[in-house]
Structure formats: structure tokens, C-alpha cells
Image: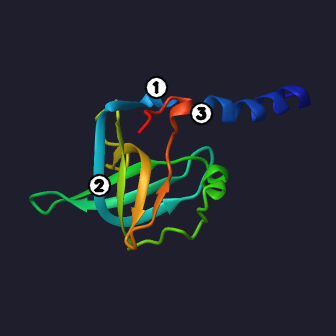
Amino acid sequence: MNRKLGILLVCAVPVLAHHSFSAEYDATKPVEVKGVVAKVEWVNPHAYIYVDMKDANGKVLRYAFETSSPNALLRRGWKRTSLKEGETVTVEGYLAKDPRPLTDGSIHGNARLVTMADGKSVFAGTSSDDGGPAK
């Protein structure tokens, strides 16, 4: 592979990975999940928050909420350590258009607002100016 082609491919990967809100999520399927943070993935192009919630029968459901990029979260006051595993949070967001669980069994959604146990809320998800529903 020549050098120019290699550089082009490396630069194209982030573009291919990005998507609009409406391509993947359904604004008519709002969801509110109160549960325990199971994992936080601080990765590009979007960070993820995994939240475990018990349903009415006591079964644990894991939600994988996509958020903004780590850089955008930093600008909103988040840090890599803002959420800790085991912490109780409430996440308001929207479910994915495809209702099938992700390969790890989690339910895929887009986080719009995360409220911490102390009541502090932080905008986390896709904003209306890039396709997400305004609230």
C-alpha cells in the first residue's frame, strides 16, 4: 500500500463511524432508566454508559447508552471519572430503531440527560442541532 492511500484510509475511518441521531435512534421511543453504572467506555467517536436496571420481575437488563464524544463531554464538565461503576444514575434518552439487543445482550439507546445520585444533571447525548430531538 502506498503512503497516500494509507493516510486516506486512516482519515476516512472516523467519518465512516459517525452517524446522525435519526439514522440509528427513534425519537418516538423515549426511555428513562434508573439503575447502576456497570461500565463506562470513554472512547471515540462516542463514549458509552452501561446501566443495569431491574425490571418488574427482578431480571437485570443492561442498557448501553451512547453519549457524545469524550471531547464534547469534557466541554460540558464531564471527566473520565465523573461516573463510577456501582453509582446509581437515571438516564433519559431514546431507544435504537433496531430493537434487537447488541452482541453483548445490552439494549442500545442514546443518552440525552444523565442525573447522578446527588441530583446533578448533565446533558450527555446528541443535541437537536445534529439530528436528535429537542427537549
In the picture of the structure, the residue carrying the numbered disc 3 is 18
> Looking at the image, is 17 positioned above or below residue 87?
above
Q: Residues within 10 Å of mark 2 (few under 14, many from 20)?
A: some
Q: Position of residue 12 (x, y in %)?
A: 72, 29
- In the picture, the disc for residue 23 is 1
76 over 117 or under it: above or below: above
- Classify residue 13 as left or right of residue 59: right
Residue 77 % position (x, y): 61, 62
Residue that lies at the very extreme toward the right in this rendered image: 3
Mark closest to the chain's N terminus, 2 or 3: 3
Q: Position of residue 78 (x, y in %)?
A: 58, 62
Is 68 rendered above or below residue 86? above
Which residue matches tag 2? 33
Residue 46 on image: x %, y %:
57, 46
- Residue at the left extreme, as displayed: 57
Q: Earlier in the sequence, mark 1 or mark 2?
A: 1
Name the residue rendered at 60%, 65% in the picture.
80
Pick whichever of labels 3 and 1 is earlier in the sequence: 3
Q: Amino acid at mark 1?
A: Ala
Tag 2 near tag 3, CB within 8 Å? no
Q: Amino acid at mark 3?
A: His
Please report contact status of discs 1 and 2: CB closer than 8 Å, yes or no: no
Discs 1/2, front: 2
Asked whether, in this view, residue 124 is left or right of residue 102, the answer is right
